[in-house]
Each structure stands twice: as structure tokens, then as C-alpha cells.
Image (cartoon, helix red, strand yellow):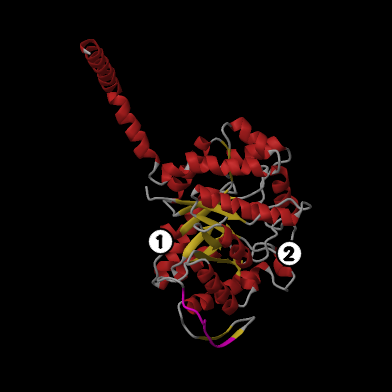
Amino acid sequence: MTRLRFGYFIAPFHRAGINPTLALQRDLELIEHLDALGYDEVWIGEHHSAGSEIISSPEVFIAAAAQRAKRIRFGTGVISLSYHNPLWAADRLMLLDHLTHGRIIGGVGPGSLPTDSAMIGLTPTDTRELLESNLDIMVRLLAGETVTAKTPTHEFFDAQLQLAPYADGGIPLSVAAVASPTGARLAGKHGIGLLSIGATLTEAGFDALAHHWNVAEERAAAFGTTVDRGNWTLVGPFHVAETDAQARADVRYGIQSWFNYFQKVAAFPQMTMPGDKIDEMIDTINDLGAGVIGTPERARAQVQRLWDQSGGFGSMLQMAADWANPAATRRSAELFAEEVMPHFQGQAQPTLNAAARAGQVREGLAQTQIDAITHMTRKYESEKAGG
């Protein structure tokens, strides 16, 4: 199996009414923790309404986080490109590329909350159409082109960026997909990465994964580009504890707020799942394959199932959901890093093999240890007698 990358997708989801300053500080602290644990990536969202997803600028947040976490890569997950002038959005990505010494992945999408787009007079259909035109311009600008063009919302006259990318190869881009083919179409058109958000969160979730990649490959063939499964990123919720019972107890802290947000607040039906009582919510997550609330063994099985169903991908992001309190959330991240990641990154089997080899010869080698002690004891006794 290809070495998988692992990370977190931090929209974030925080219960409305809690201290937002404290919640944001905890997000920053979690990223520091993930960096120390060896996670590869963390992606940060953009939202402007509904009270739970309170990061309005992934670029600003990443600039702060990158000063604390010096190794991990950062993805904008995502810039709602339909809301923005693509020239300035590309320029901000370029600035982040330099501030982070090349640790940026430019994730874009149409924007997920209709309450966001409604405030600037756009419908969800508008945002999906604008994403295509704005992404076309962003791709050209980041490639160093000079752009003269007109979109329904902006006009450009010899527009160009004043900085080159930090490293050869430029800034990798990725486009989000939830249910519609919009993101997968654009990933194929431009030969860029695909970010499948919430593809496990519906009853037909695993079929949606295959559909996403099929669309990307079909469009890539049509436009003469290529797409790479190594640039395909999946997102799904996990909470891991030493036992299933402990995991279920942990998520009683916040899972009800998360379900309530999608059932009654956010006009985002693709993420809505059934469940009225907490135990029912937990069972829904596990039984539908939407995510994992349980042991590391369950988490390993989920990642393997996603791999097998999709045909392979490059990165698995855990959706940060505030299901558990901060201490249990940190412990979940640790357990996942200890017990899940090594099995997909080539680190678990070598130590298991070494232990097995040692076990096979233990009996014989243990006897040589005993023989050595007996020999040296007799030698000492002989020396003492002779002295």
C-alpha cells in the first residue's frame, strides 16, 4: 500500500454559545499537538454565519498557526472562492506560501453555507458557477500568467502576481466535493487535487467516493490533463479511545450539538444524519459507516474500507467535531497516531516482523544467556579459589 498521509480537517465545529476566543485558542493548541504527533496536514475552513464554524479566514488563521507548528503542512479547507476576487485570493495564497516556507495547499470550493452566500446576494447555484470561472483565473495566475478576463463579478486587466512560488512546482491546489459533481469536474479539468468532504456522511457515502474519482478521471481525459490519486484527500469523523465504551462515553460531551447543528441550523442537507438520542447518534455514525466512535482497531478498519472502496487515495483527514472534551480529543489524536497511522505508513509491520523473528529464536538464545552467566560464575569462583 502507498504511504498514506494523515491529518485533520478543522472547519471548525464549536457549540454556539461557548467562548469563541477560547475555542479558537484550543484549535491552535490542537494543531501544535498534531504537529508534535507527526500528522502530515491540517486543513482550515472558511465560514461566516450559523454560529459554529467560526473561522472566517483560513489564511489569517493559518498564518497564526504556522508560527506555532513548524513542520505540518496547511491546507485551506476551503477558501470559498466564489465569494472572492480570485486575483487577491491567489495573492494571499502566495503570501502564505512564503510565510510557511512552502507548506501550503490551496483548497478551494463554492462555499457550503447558504447563509453565507445569501448575505452577498448569491445562491448555491451562483456559487458553483462562479467557482469554475474564478478557479480558471486562479490557476492561470498561480502558474505565472498575465490575465485579462471578465467574470460575472470581476474584471481583470493584465492581472498578475508579484511573487513567484516559494519552491519549484508551485502551490498545489485542490477543489472540494461533497455531493454534486462540481468539484470533481474541476479537479479533472485542471489536473489538480480533489478534497472529498463528508463523502462518508450519507448512507450512499462509499458510492459517492467512487463517483467523485470517476468524474475527475472522465473530465481529465476530456481536457487532456491527468489526475493523481495521491492528491485525493478524504475527510471523515473519528473519535478513538482505549475501549468502545470509553469512546461512547467521551462523545456524550458534544455529539448532540454536532447533530443538532446539521439537523436544525446549517442548511447543508448533505451532512444531515438521523438520530434524536445520543446512543442513537453514536450508532448512526458507526452503523452507516459515516465514521468511527470506538477503538483504534475500528479506526484501522474504517481507513482500510475507504481505501478498498475508493481504489486508493493520498490523504485521510479526521473531521474535528468537538464530540469530546479537549483532553479526550487530544488523547484520541494520540491513539490514532500510535495505533492507526503506522499500519498505513509502513512503520508497523517492520517492528512486528522484528518481534516475531526474536520470538522464534528466544528459547535458544535465552539458554545461551544462562550458559554465559554460568560460565562467568565458574570462572570467578575458579579465580577466587586460585587466589
**Residue 3 drawn at (x, y percent):** 40, 50
**Residue 54 drawn at (x, y percent):** 70, 59
Residue shown at 60%/74% (left/top)?
A: 130
Query: Quick check: is 158 in the magenta stretch?
Result: yes
Q: Which residue in the rendered view is the most extreme toward the top? A: 385
Q: In this view, does 277 lie above or below 132?
A: above
**Residue 292 drawn at (x, y percent):** 57, 41
Which element is circle 1 on? loop
- Residue hosting label 1: 228
Q: What type of secondary structure mainly makes up the magenta span?
A: loop
Q: Which residue in the rendered view is the most extreme toward the bottom? A: 157
Q: Give the range drawn in magenta.
A: 156-165
Q: Is residue 262 left or right of residue 290?
A: right
**Residue 332 drawn at (x, y percent):** 58, 41
- Residue hosting label 2: 115
Front residue of this view, candidates 45 and 374: 374
Residue shown at 44%/53% (left/top)?
A: 313
Q: In which quadrant is the C terminus drawn?
A: top left
Q: Residue 252 carries which label?
A: none
Q: Which residue in the rendered view is the most extreme toward the front? A: 387
